[in-house]
């Protein structure tokens, strides 16, 4: 397995346009996370899926943001009516708890860098 | 809720010198602790983690971190740094047990000077 992959790696868009990012987790991982990272900051949690169910959403995830994981495998993050403040690196991570008491270590993809002009 | 403080935003160090990157956390429950490294224009890579047991954890590339519950710290150390260690390092914490949201610090940029 080659790890978590994200596409595209870079996206430049004009303010007001919609964008969609894709994340393919490690194949045996049932948990998937989205984070946002702005310059000079650590990643900030956006949302979490267990299989296809979205179980937690951060207050950072405004109504313009929507995430899906329709078949419990890949996930998409859509931003509608983008704003300049949406410019950031969007990171996806996946994990799987192995066995009783196992850890839930998250493994990250390379990210999608969004620039809103 | 948990929080993480990384006290230094940038740490310059000469090649082959030792380095310590500081991390303090706050939590009212038991925690897991992580260090991630991010090379330029790349995603985060797990460097090492503390889950339970021995308070000293090591990575494969010579880094180590020690969990100090009384000091609520998880400082990262390396006795001799290489140019290739130049990167940004993030300390992270989650509550222990099952799925828990991971909270990251603001990162420390390690710059190794030849």
Image (cartoon, coloured by chain):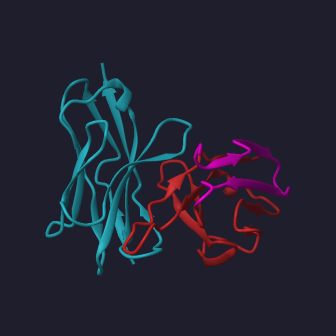
> Which chain, by letter, is cyan?
B
Q: Is residue B89 left or right of residue A37?
A: left
The x, y position of residue B18, in whole percent, is 18, 34
The span picked out in magenta is A1-28
Q: Position of residue A36 (x, y in %)?
A: 59, 58
Q: Residue at x 75, y 68 (%)?
A: A71
In the picture, which chain is red?
Answer: A
Apparent side of residue A9 relative to residue B4 in the rendered image (left or right): right
Residue at image point 78% right, 59% down: A82
Q: Residue furthest left?
A: B70
Lateral position of residue A19 relative to residue A61, left or right: right
Task: Name the quadrant of the N terminus of chain B.
Answer: bottom left
Query: Which residue is found at the position 67% from the left and 77% from the top?
Result: A53
Within the magenta stretch, is there residue A88? Answer: no
Q: Nearer the viewer, residue A38 or B46?
A: B46
- Say if B83 sits above or below A39 in the image: above
Question: What residue is shown at x 74% (from left), y 54% (from top)?
Answer: A21
Residue A27, image x, y percentages: 63, 56
Q: Indicate the position of residue A117 as horizontal and vertical percent values.
A: 77, 46
Question: Per the image, is A2 magenta?
Answer: yes
């Amino acid at each position: 397995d080659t790890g978590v992959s994200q596409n595209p790696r870079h996206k430049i868009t004009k303010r007001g346009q919609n964008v969609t990012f894709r994340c393919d987790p490690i194949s045996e991982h049932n948990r998937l996370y989205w984070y946002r990272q702005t310059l000079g900051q650590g990643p900030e949690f956006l949302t979490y899926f267990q299989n296809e169910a979205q179980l937690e959403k951060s207050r950072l995830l405004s109504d313009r943001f929507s995430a899906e994981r329709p078949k419990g495998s890949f996930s998409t993050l859509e931003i509608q009516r983008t704003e300049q403040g949406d410019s950031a690196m969007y990171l996806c991570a996946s994990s799987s708890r192995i066995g009783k008491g196992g850890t839930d270590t998250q493994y990250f993809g390379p990210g999608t860098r969004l620039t809103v002009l | 809720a948990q929080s993480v403080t990384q006290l230094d935003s940038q740490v310059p160090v000469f090649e082959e010198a030792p380095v310590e990157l500081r991390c303090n956390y706050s939590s009212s429950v038991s925690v897991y602790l992580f260090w991630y490294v991010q090379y330029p224009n790349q995603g985060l890579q797990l460097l090492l983690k503390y889950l339970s047991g021995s308070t000293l954890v090591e990575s494969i590339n010579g880094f180590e971190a020690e969990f100090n519950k009384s000091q609520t710290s998880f400082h990262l150390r390396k006795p001799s740094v290489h140019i290739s260690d130049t990167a940004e390092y993030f300390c992270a914490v989650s509550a222990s047990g099952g799925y828990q949201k991971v909270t990251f610090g603001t990162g420390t940029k390690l710059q190794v000077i030849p």
